[in-house]
């Protein structure tokens, strides 16, 4: 089925999650992709958050997402993608289950300078069997790591896609979503092949 197949059917809404650590670029990526004015729930970093919202590696960051980011992309008359940026700070993790309900898949955005910050997101989607890809947000001046190094550091399975992007650029961010959709389709087709209609495995 191609995108054009949605034209003559009832509108389909697809939900995609954007996850990752604090300050990794989730709000920026949603803003680069959305065709509407993005909904943002950013607040200024304040004194009470000192020691909680750790800014190591992102010392210039002055705001934090306290609920979610939201954007929309219209693929065709019958297919719309809704983007939900998930808060990265531990004190807001309780919202993840509600935000994840009904999602097609997820993008785990990672900063190669702080790879450990995305462990929780990876573990969360693995436990829920949610299809996801890892997108390396390539900051200017950041050290280059090849895919094998990143895969070992994050303990990713061999088939988990890793893609590089610039979260500020629409085309680059769009390629991340295309990779996620391709991965989700491949995972669904693989699951269908290993189980027969009677439930026995080939």
Image (cartoon, rainbow, N blue to C red):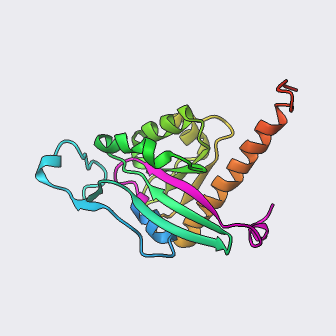
Please state if 84 lies on the left or on the right of 184 as rendered: left
With respect to residue 190, does 42 lie above or below? below
Seen as rendered, the residue at the extreme top is 200
Res. 62 visible in picture: no
Q: Is residue 50 left or right of residue 141?
A: left
Q: How many marks?
A: 0
> Does the stretch in magenta take in 3?
yes
Residue found at x 75% / y 67%? 9
Q: Quadrant of the C terminus?
A: top right
Q: Quadrant of residue 62?
A: bottom left
In this rendering, the answer to whether 29 lies above or below 126 is: below
Segment tinted magenta in the rendering:
1-26
105 left or right of 50 in image: right
- Asked whether residue 5 is drawn in magenta, I would say yes
Q: Quadrant of residue 172?
A: bottom right
From the top left corner, tell me how far across and down residue 82 is, in percent.
Answer: 53, 62
The residue most toward the left is 47
Q: Is residue 28 left or right of residue 102?
A: left
Residue displayed at 55% across by 64% down = 173
- In this view, the residue farthest toward the front is 10
For the N terminus, the image quarter is: bottom right
The residue depicted at 34 percent of the width and 49 percent of the height is 22
Q: Nearer the viewer, residue 197 or 26?
A: 197
| Quarter of the rendering containing residue 15 | bottom right
Whole-percent x, y for residue 20 in the image: 43, 48
Residue 158 appears in the figure: yes
x, y percent for residue 171: 58, 71
**Residue 80 image offset from top left, x and y in percent:** 61, 67
């Amino acid at each position: 089925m191609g995108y054009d197949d949605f034209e003559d059917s009832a509108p389909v809404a697809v939900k995609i999650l954007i996850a990752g650590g604090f300050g990794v670029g989730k709000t920026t990526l949603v803003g680069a992709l959305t065709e509407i004015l993005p909904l943002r729930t950013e607040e200024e970093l304040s004194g009470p958050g000192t020691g909680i919202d750790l800014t190591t590696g992102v010392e210039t960051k002055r705001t934090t997402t306290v609920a979610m980011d939201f954007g929309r992309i219209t693929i065709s008359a019958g297919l719309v993608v809704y983007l939900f940026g998930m808060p990265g700070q531990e004190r807001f993790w309780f919202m993840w289950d509600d935000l994840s309900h009904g999602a097609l898949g997820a993008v785990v955005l990672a900063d190669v300078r702080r790879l450990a910050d995305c462990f929780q997101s990876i573990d969360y989607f693995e436990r829920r069997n949610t299809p996801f890809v890892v997108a390396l947000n390539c900051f200017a001046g950041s050290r280059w790591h090849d895919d094998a190094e990143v895969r070992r550091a994050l303990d990713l399975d061999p088939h988990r896609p890793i893609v590089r992007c610039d979260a500020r650029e629409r085309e680059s961010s769009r390629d991340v979503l295309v990779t996620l959709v391709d991965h989700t389709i491949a995972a669904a087709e693989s699951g269908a092949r290993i189980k027969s209609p009677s439930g026995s495995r080939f």
